[in-house]
């Protein structure tokens, strides 16, 4: 595993606000683990304004050790029943043993609602700048939130924690 001191974080996201929040959070968390994070939204123009060769040359000439590319792979809808209360109601023959025995476990009243949410699966791949090879690869599922700051922090935290656990980053 090469030593990574400078890593550009490139969030390949349609929503610029989420990208910006995510890359800002990654910069903070990487710094806590001995890596200088460079936010791609601060140094690279939009994709349609730069040719691939020019981008490749800029990265090669930079002091970067790695480029971390993060992109969503899929989004899926999920739902979950949320129970708000559960009350046991004794059966009519509660004080007589046999009617009680046969119905004791069937008399439960519940109140609940269904919660729907979107789960987004993202992949994250750091590439070593010198040889352009993949260093490591990971994926994570996160519940989508309209609170971009919360969403970005959640993704960033899970990615940095996993990279640290797998010794991709951290004090070496």
Image (tube, helix red, strand yellow):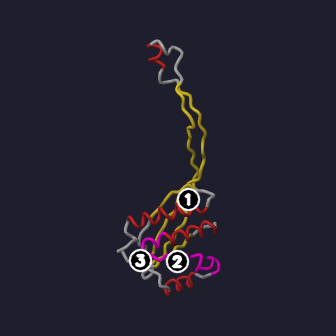
Dot 2: element: strand
Rendered-image quadrant of the N terminus: bottom left
Q: Nearer the viewer, residue 29 or 138?
A: 29
Indicate the position of residue 80 as horizontal and vertical percent values: 56, 43
Indicate the position of residue 152 as horizontal and vertical percent values: 56, 63
N-terminal label among 1 and 2? 2
- Mark 1 vs mark 2: give the one in front: 2
Count how many numbered circles sit on residues in the image: 3
Which residue does the numbered mark 1 point to in the structure image?
74
- Residue at coordinates 52% horizontally, 68% vertically from top-left? 70
Indicate the position of residue 25 as horizontal and vertical percent values: 53, 68
Residue ranking furthest to the bottom: 61
Q: Residues within 10 Å of mark 2 (few under 14, many from 20)?
A: many
Tell me: residue 26, above or below residue 65.
Answer: above
Q: Nearer the viewer, residue 47 or 63?
A: 63
**In the figure, is residue 149 to the left or right of 158?**
right
- Mark 3 vs mark 1: give the one in front: 3
In the rendered structure, which segment of residues is drawn in magenta? 29-49
Tell me: residue 142, above or below residue 71.
Answer: above
Q: Which mark is residue 4?
A: 3
Q: For the residues marked 2 and 3, what is the alpha-carbon distance in whole angstroms?
A: 12 Å
N-terminal label among 2 and 3? 3
Rendered-image quadrant of the C terminus: bottom left
Dot 1: element: strand
Which residue does the numbered mark 2 point to in the structure image?
38
């Amino acid at each position: 595993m090469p030593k990574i001191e400078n890593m550009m974080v490139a969030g390949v996201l349609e929503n610029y606000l989420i990208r910006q929040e995510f890359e800002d959070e990654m910069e903070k968390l990487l710094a806590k683990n001995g890596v200088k994070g460079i936010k791609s939204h601060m140094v690279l123009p939009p994709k349609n304004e730069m040719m691939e060769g020019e981008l490749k040359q800029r990265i090669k000439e930079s002091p970067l050790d790695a480029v971390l590319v993060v992109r969503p792979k899929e989004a899926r809808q999920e739902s979950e029943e949320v129970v708000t209360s559960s009350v046991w109601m004794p059966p009519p023959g509660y004080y007589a043993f046999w009617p009680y025995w046969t119905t004791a476990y069937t008399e439960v009243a519940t109140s609940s609602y269904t919660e729907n949410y979107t789960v987004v699966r993202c992949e994250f791949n750091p590439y070593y700048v010198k040889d352009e090879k993949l260093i490591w690869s990971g994926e994570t599922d996160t519940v989508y939130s309209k609170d971009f700051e919360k969403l970005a922090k959640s993704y960033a935290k899970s990615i940095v924690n996993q990279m640290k656990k797998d010794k991709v980053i951290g004090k070496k």
